[in-house]
Amino acid sequence: MSVYNLISFLGIFVLLSAAWILSSNKRNINFRVIIWGIGLQLVFGAFVFLLPVGAKFFLYLNDIVVVVLDSASAGAEFLFGRLALPPRDE
């Protein structure tokens, strides 16, 4: 486990603590929802970082999203011409 993973793990609890401290109605917090949310984040994190199939799955999804975005950019360029191109650095 790298230091960045540990920092991210601790960041969940830092953000949760900050939200609790800044809350104006601390008695109305539903801890069941919070525990479920943190649990789901930990399950997804374990799936991605501990199982090789998890990382491959999300890389596959990333490839699909990149293809869709490239297609959308090509369509916008076809439809709008030069207006769809990003500005050039000069």
Image (spheres, rainbow, N blue to C red):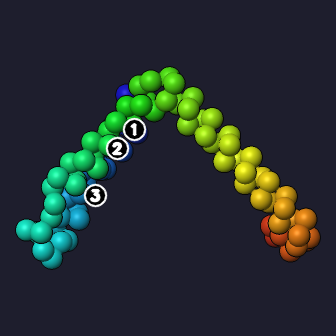
Report which quarter residue 43 is drawn in: top left
Q: Residues within 10 Å of mark 1 (few under 14, many from 20)?
A: few
Tell me the distance, in whole angstroms, between the alpha carbons under discs 2 and 1.
5 Å
Q: Say which amino acid is labelled 2.
A: Gln
Question: Is residue 2 something one can see in this rendering?
Answer: no
63 horizontally vs 70: left or right: left
Tell me the distance, in whole angstroms, between the alpha carbons under discs 1 and 3.
18 Å
| Mark 1 or 3, nearer chain start | 3
What label sits on residue 41 in the rendered view?
A: 2
Contact check, label 2 and label 1, Cβ < 8 Å: yes
Residue at image mark 3: 15
Q: Residues within 10 Å of mark 2 (few under 14, many from 20)?
A: some
Report which quarter residue 45 is drawn in: top left
- Secondary structure beneath disc 3? helix
Residue at image mark 1: 44
Residue 20 image position (x, y, % from top left): 17, 64
